[in-house]
Every structure is written in structure tokens, then in C-alpha cells.
């Protein structure tokens, strides 16, 4: 695909100031305390984001990047940790423990335990650690982008097939309207973290310049300014892990101040003509303009 909208690279080295990790740990600790006191009625995204002093657009990815688990997994893990204390009480049974810690049935308790830890309950009690697979090293840099007009179609859900269908509808309209000569690229607006949110919001976008689309589509201007970015290579299913790696680099390596705006995807080649292992996706994390 030709004529992609490029960004200008800025010179910005990772910060050498004292312990951004400790600062972020303190901010997430406030959210963790809120979760821990409300396991039976978990706090909302807005409550957690406010506790951590971060935009709701970025809270889930920041939490997952720095803790290695989703908020839902954290809640389940804390419930399971509470169950361990119950099981240590003389005379306790798996059934009574499951009920006392909020699980509907012993079977649901066992499934949640295995799903969240990857090991059996007995192995977990014995101290077997959950393995974390490291992501490959990728160059992270800062680019300055100009505002860009796109036409968007929203899809709710975690199904890449549905997202592909949305892009198909956008391209069918653009072709019928004789607008492909103005094509500047394929983008996505990732409003939610698909690993943390059911029915995550995602806007499929094509850049065609300032046009007025039909009612089923929306005209959106992607904001200009600084973005932290890197290019992920591989199957689109690996993008959530790549997002977490970029978020971790932003918070820990660059100590970046994030803008109150969602992460963007910029698709650099055509999935219909490119082998899966060669697909390229530029991930763009918006930074506060003062950074």
C-alpha cells in the first residue's frame, strides 16, 4: 500500500530521573487498595483511573503492562488468595471455601483458579509461579504527527473478523464514491484494551482527507502532536501484547506523560496480500504536548 502518512522523528532519550517505576507503583497501589477493599463489588474503570491519576483510555493497558495481568485477573487472583486462607482453617472444605470467597460453585472456583494462574490449586499452594513470556525487543521512538482526517466505523467486541468486516465496508464505500485516489492510509482507534474489556470499542478508519461520509460512518480527526511509537511485526492477534510492551516502555523507560486520548494503530501493509508473519502495525501512544 502506497502513500502512508509519515511522522517526523523527534530526539528524546529515555529519562534518567529517579525511579519512575516507584512513582507508578505508588499510583497503581492506590487503585489496588480500592480493588482490595471491594472484591465483592469491583470499582468501575473511572474510579480506578481516578485513583491512579491516569486517563481511563490508558488505565487498563498501564495496569496490565506493570502488573502482568488484567484487572479482572487481579480480582480473581485476590479472591483465590483469600480462598487459600480459608483452606488453611481446620475443617474447611473446597465447597465452603468456594462459597465463602464469592464463587457460585466449587467447579467455578477450580476453573477460575486454573484460568488465572495456569497451574492447579495444589501446585499454586505449593508455590509454583506463573510463567511470563517476554516480548521481543523493539525500537521505541517518539514521532511528531500532523492532525489527520479519517472516516471511521465503530465495532464493539474482541473479534478481529468483525473488525475486518468494518474495513471491508469502509473500502467498499470509498471505492463506490471514487475516493481511493485520495487514500492516505489505514488506521485504527483502540479505545479499550481487548485483554481487559469485553466488547472493547475499536474504530476502523481509512484516511481519505476531509470528506463528509454517509450517516453510517463518522468523520474523525486524529490529533496531531507527539506520539511514542514502535512497529510490531506479526499476526494481529499479538497486538494486545505489543501494546502492553509499548505502555511499559512509555511509563518506565521514558517516564512519559500520556495524553487523554486513545492509542492508535497504523497498518503498514495489506493483510490480503501479506503473509501473517510479515504484517506490520505501527502502534502510536499519544503523549501530552508538553512532553
Image (spheres, rainbow, N blue to C red):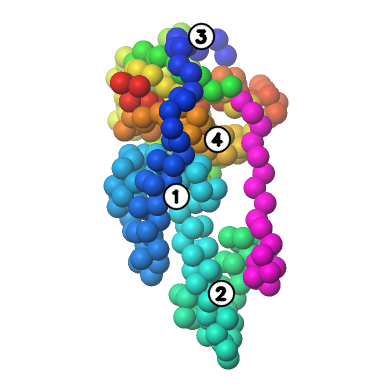
- Which label's residue is closer to the chain start, 3 or 4? 3
- Percent across and percent down for residue 74 are 49, 58
Q: Are marks 1 and 3 in contact (CB under 8 Å)?
A: no
Q: Residues within 10 Å of mark 4 (few under 14, many from 20)?
A: many
The alpha-carbon separation of the residues under discs 3 and 2 comes to 57 Å
Q: Are marks 1 and 4 in contact (CB under 8 Å)?
A: no
Image-quadrant location for residue 136: top right
Give the residue number, with chain letter if any, for mark 3.
Answer: 3
Q: Is residue 32 above or below residue 218?
A: below
- Percent across and percent down for residue 142 are 46, 18
Closer to the observer: label 2 or label 4? 2
- Percent across and percent down for residue 200 are 43, 45
Give the residue number, with chain letter if any, for mark 4.
Answer: 245
- Which label's residue is closer to the chain start, 3 or 2? 3
Q: Is residue 247 visible?
A: no
Give the residue number, with chain letter if any, for mark 1.
Answer: 197
Residues drawn in magenta: 120-138
The alpha-carbon separation of the residues under discs 1 and 3 comes to 34 Å
The alpha-carbon separation of the residues under discs 2 and 4 comes to 32 Å
Q: Which mark is residue 84?
A: 2
Please indicate whether residue 240 sits to the left or right of residue 121 in the image: left
- Which label's residue is closer to the chain start, 1 or 4? 1
| SS category of the residue bearing label 2 | helix
Amino acid at each position: 500500500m502506497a502513500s502512508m502518512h509519515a511522522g517526523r522523528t523527534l530526539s528524546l532519550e529515555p529519562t534518567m530521573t529517579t525511579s519512575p517505576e516507584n512513582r507508578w507503583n505508588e499510583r497503581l497501589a492506590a487503585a489496588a487498595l480500592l480493588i482490595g477493599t471491594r472484591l465483592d463489588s469491583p470499582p468501575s474503570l473511572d474510579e480506578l483511573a481516578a485513583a491512579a491519576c491516569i486517563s481511563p483510555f490508558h488505565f487498563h493497558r498501564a495496569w496490565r503492562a506493570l502488573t502482568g495481568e488484567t484487572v479482572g485477573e487481579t480480582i480473581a487472583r485476590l479472591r483465590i488468595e483469600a480462598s487459600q486462607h480459608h483452606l488453611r482453617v481446620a475443617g474447611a472444605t473446597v465447597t465452603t471455601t468456594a462459597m465463602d470467597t464469592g464463587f457460585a460453585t466449587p467447579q467455578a472456583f477450580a476453573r477460575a483458579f486454573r484460568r488465572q494462574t495456569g497451574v492447579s490449586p495444589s501446585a499454586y499452594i505449593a508455590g509454583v509461579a506463573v510463567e511470563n513470556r517476554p516480548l521481543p525487543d523493539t525500537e521505541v521512538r517518539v514521532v511528531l504527527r500532523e492532525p489527520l482526517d479519517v472516516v471511521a466505523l465503530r465495532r464493539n467486541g474482541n473479534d478481529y473478523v468483525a473488525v475486518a468486516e468494518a474495513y471491508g465496508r469502509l473500502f467498499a464505500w470509498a471505492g463506490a464514491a471514487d475516493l481511493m485516489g485520495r487514500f492516505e492510509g489505514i488506521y485504527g482507534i483502540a479505545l479499550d484494551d481487548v485483554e481487559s474489556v469485553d466488547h472493547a470499542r475499536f474504530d476502523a478508519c481509512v484516511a481519505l482527507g476531509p470528506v463528509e461520509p454517509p450517516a453510517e460512518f463518522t468523520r474523525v480527526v486524529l490529533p496531531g502532536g507527539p506520539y511514542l511509537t514502535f512497529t510490531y511485526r506479526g499476526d494481529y492477534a499479538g497486538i494486545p501484547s505489543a501494546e502492553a510492551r509499548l505502555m511499559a516502555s512509555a511509563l518506565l523507560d521514558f517516564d512519559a506523560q500520556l495524553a487523554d486520548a486513545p492509542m492508535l494503530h497504523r497498518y503498514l501493509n495489506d493483510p490480503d496480500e501479506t503473509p501473517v508473519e510479515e504484517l506490520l502495525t505501527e502502534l502510536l501512544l499519544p503523549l501530552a504536548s508538553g512532553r
